Image: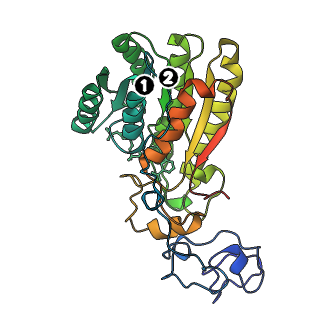
Amino acid sequence: MNCACEGGNSRGCDCVMASACPKTPGRAIGLRQDRLLRPAGPTAHRTAEVDVRSPPVLPEAVGWDGHMTSETDLRGRTALVTGGSRGIGAATARRLAREGADVAVTYVRGKDAAEEVVRDIEALGRRAVALRADSADAAQAGDAVRRAAEELGGLDVLVGNAAVGMTGPLESLSLADVDRLLAVNVRGVFLAARSAAAVMGDGGRIITVGSCVTARVPGPGATLYAMSKSAVVGLTKALARELAGRGITANVVHPGPTDTDMNPADGPYASGQAAVTALGRFGTAEEVASMVAFLAGPDAAYVTGAEFSVDGGYAA
Ligand SMILES: NC(=O)c1ccc[n+]([C@@H]2O[C@H](COP(=O)([O-])OP(=O)(O)OC[C@H]3O[C@@H](n4cnc5c(N)ncnc54)[C@H](OP(=O)(O)O)[C@@H]3O)[C@@H](O)[C@H]2O)c1
C-alpha cells in the first residue's frame, strides 16, 4: 500500500499530505508512517505544491532561549510531577521549582536521574524529593500522592505526566500490552488525581499531559497510545466539573513531537513528525514545561477543563 486515499489509487500514488494527492486532493486518509517521515525543509522536495517551507526558525535565532521569560509565582506551593526523572516531567519539575515551588517527582527505573532532578531543585533553595512509584501499580499510583503531600507538607499542584508509548499494528498488540499501557497512561493518572483531590486544599491545580495525537493521528500504528491519551482528555474535563466547587482546576496539555527519550528528535520517525508541524521542528521539554507552569500559577485561576496544545502547530 502506498496511499489510502479515497480515490482508490492505492498503487503508485506518491502523495504525502492530503492536499497533495494528485487524484483526490484533500481526501487522503490513513497515510503510511514512512510517507510522513521525509525530512522537512529545503531538502524535502516531496512535491512542488506541498513542501515550500524554509528551514525551521529556532527560538534562539529570534532571541528566545526557550526558558523562563515571565514570572509565575509559585512560592510557598508544593507540587508532584509523576514521571519526573526524565524528559518533559524532569523539565517541568525544574521549571516549577524555578518559579518557587517545592517539588516531588516519581520515577520507576531512573533513580539516578530523579536524584539529579532533586539536587538541581535543592540548588535553587527549594525542597525536593524523589519517590519510586510505579503508575502501573494501583496502590503505588495513589500512594505516591499521599507520600508527596507528607514529605512536602501538603500538595497544591499535581502534574500527571508519567506515561509509556507503544505503537504498532493492531494485530501486534497483545492483551498484556493493552492492559499495561492503560494502567500507566489512564488508570495511573486517574488514581493520582483522585488521591490529589483528597489531599489538596481549595484552589489546587491538576494538570494532565495528553498528546497531539488526540487531535490528529498522522499515520497508522497509534491506536493504543491515542486511545489512552483521549481518555486523559475525558478524565481531565470531568475532573474540572467535579472539583470546581473547591476552586481546583484541571487542564490537559498536549505536547507535540518533543525531543525526549520517548521520542528523540533524531529518531527514525522524527523528520516525518517535524514535517507535520507548522513550525517544522520538534519542541523541547522546556517549551511544554512553560505551559504547565502557567496553568499551575495564579494567572490561570479562571482556566479549567481546557486543552492546551504545545505542538508547533501539529494540530493546525
Ligand atoms: N515526547 C513526545 O513527543 C510526547 C508527545 C506527546 C505527548 N507526550 C507525553 O508527555 C509525557 C512525558 O513524555 P516524555 O517524552 O518526557 O517521556 P520519557 O522521556 O519517556 O519520560 C517518561 C517519564 O515517565 C516515567 N515513567 C515511565 N513509566 C512510568 C511508570 N510506570 N510509573 C511512573 N513513572 C513512569 C519515566 O521514569 P523512569 O525513567 O524512572 O522509568 C520518565 O520519568 C507523557 O505523558 C507522554 O505521553 C510526549
Pointer 1 or 2: first along the chain: 1
Q: Which residue is mark 1?
A: 80
Q: Looking at the image, is 18 positioned above or below residue 163?
A: below
Q: Residue at x 23, y 30 (%)?
A: 119
Q: Which mark is residue 152?
A: none
Asked whether disc 1 touches disc 2, contact meaning CB atoms under 8 Å apart, the reply is yes
- The residue at the far front in this view is 63
> In this view of the protein, can residue 180 be seen by the observer?
yes
Residue 55 placement (x, y as % from top left):
50, 73
Asked whether the viewer can see residue 228, the reply is: no
Q: Quadrant of the C terminus?
A: bottom right
The residue lying toward the viewer, choosing from 170 and 208, is: 208
The residue carrying mark 2 is 157
Residue depicted at x 58% and y 63%: 277
Q: Name the side, left or right, on which 310 lies relative to 237.
A: left
Colour mode?
rainbow
Q: Does residue 95 lie above or below 272 as drawn?
A: above
Query: For the N terminus, which image quadrant?
Result: bottom right
* Residue 179 horizontal/vertical position (percent): 49, 40
Whole-angstrom CA distance, mark 1 to mark 2, is 6 Å
Q: Amino acid at mark 2?
A: Val
Q: Residue at x 46, y 52 (%)?
A: 64
Q: What's under tag 1, amino acid-wise?
A: Leu
Q: Position of residue 262 (x, y in %)?
A: 40, 52
